Amino acid sequence: MQELTILTTLFVEMVRISQDIRQHIVVQMSNGKGQRGVARELNVGQTTARQIRQRFLDTESTKDSPKCGRPMKSSDRKRRFLSRLLNAKPFSSARECYE
């Protein structure tokens, strides 16, 4: 069961926080509101609020930095298929999944 959990977490993508929420976090924290209050109000994690504020102080921007590395080879459709396959047959080998 632990292997299944590890494999299915590989296919989960994090939710992107919109620019409006990021700007709201920066404005609220600049006005003196604490990260806990801002995070609770906007339903984001405290660490997320702190990191957005810190990134703004470092770069004066709330935009995402450009990503590096190789793009994913599998499509969203293929990842969903593999996730369903692994949930249906949790003890199958990689060879069985490939076939």
Image: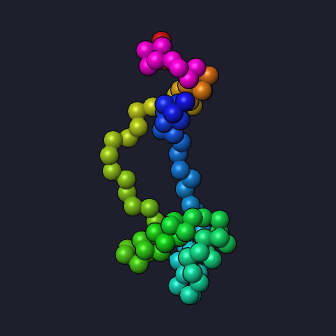
Q: Compared with residue 39, is residue 76 higher up or lower down, i.e. above or below?
A: above
Judge from the rendering whether residue 66 lies leftward or rightward of residue 42; answer left or right: left
Q: Which residue shows up at 53% across the image and 50% down it?
A: 14
Q: Compared with residue 28, is residue 48 higher up or lower down, i.e. above or below?
A: above
Quadrant of the image occupied by residue 23: bottom right
- Numbered label tally: 0
Residue 89: percent from left, percent from top: 58, 20
Which residues are drawn in magenta?
89-96
Q: Which residue shows up at 40% across the image and 33% down it?
A: 73
Residue 66: percent from left, percent from top: 37, 57
Give 54 or 75, whichever is nearer the viewer: 54
Q: Residue furthest front?
A: 1
Q: Main secondary structure of the magenta part?
A: loop
Judge from the rendering whether residue 84 lies leftward or rightward of residue 64; answer left or right: right
Q: Which residue shows up at 59% across the image and 75% down it?
A: 36
Give 53 or 47, whichever is nearer the viewer: 47
Quadrant of the image occupied by residue 81: top right
Q: Residue furthest left?
A: 69
Q: Residue furthest bottom?
A: 31
Residue 96: percent from left, percent from top: 48, 13
Magenta span includes 23: no
Q: Can residue 98 be seen by looking at this rendering?
A: no
Q: Compared with residue 76, is residue 36 higher up or lower down, i.e. above or below?
A: below
Magenta span includes 93: yes
Q: Which residue shows up at 59% across the image and 84% down it?
A: 33
